[in-house]
Image: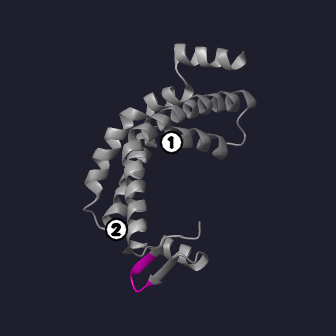
Amino acid sequence: MLDFFGKTVAKLFGSKAEKDLKDVVPYVALINAEYAKLTGLTDDQLRQRTQEVRQQIDGKLAGLDGQIAGLQGQIDSQPQLDVAKKEQIFDQIDVLEKQRNKDLEAALTDALPQAFAIVKETARRYAQNGQLVVTATDADRDIARTKGNVTIQGDKAFSFSNHSF
């Protein structure tokens, strides 16, 4: 009886999988278009594209982050503020943080096709080549000290895929 009811509801309104697929399908063409742009890039250029995506997201949030930091700075630099004034500033911070979360969601949604394409291309390179070779940064050197799948040779960082799974 319950199975019949579930199937009837699914026929009328669609299943969860169909709804999820409807939400994802518009992104597929965007991701594939971005992915096509990445195949000719070097590993360093692919890394640079990742940084560009991060910078785009940070740029969209910079104004609100500055306002929040300014208000937080007022509170930190003036410990003698009365409770009512602090409460007012904290309320402003709460409003700005809620707006920041909305802006972050929009920025991440905008960046999704590029970010997913970068991950897809990186995974393809690991599968085909077994490694990525990039110009070593300080972050690479730090990671190489603690992780066995990153090695530094000269000014190059070699990142090996983990085939143990």
- The mark tally for this picture is 2
Quadrant where the N terminus is found in the figure: top right
Mark linked to residue 43 = 2
| Amino acid type assigned to the residue bearing label 1 in the image | Asp
Residue designated by label 1: 65
Answer few, some or many: residues within 10 Å of disc 2's Cα (few below 14, many 20 plus, some between 14 and 19): some
Mark linked to residue 110 = none
Q: What residue is drawn where x is 50% and y is 26%? A: 19
Q: What residue is drawn where x is 55% and y is 73%? A: 143
- Front position in the image: 97 or 73: 97
> Measured from the top left, where is residue 61 in percent x and y?
45, 41
Q: Tell me if I can see residue 132 in this picture.
A: no
Magenta span main SS: strand
Q: What residue is drawn where x is 66% and y is 14%? A: 5
If you read the primary sequence from the N terminus, does the residue marked by circle 2 or circle 1 appear first?
A: 2
The quarter of the displayed image where residue 48 is located: bottom left
In the visual, does 161 lie left or right of 91? Answer: left
Answer few, some or many: residues within 10 Å of disc 1's Cα (few below 14, many 20 plus, some between 14 and 19): some
In the visual, does 19 lie left or right of 132? Answer: right
| Contact check, label 2 and label 1, Cβ < 8 Å | no
Q: Tell me if I can see residue 119 in this picture.
A: yes
User: Which secondary structure, mark 2?
Assistant: helix
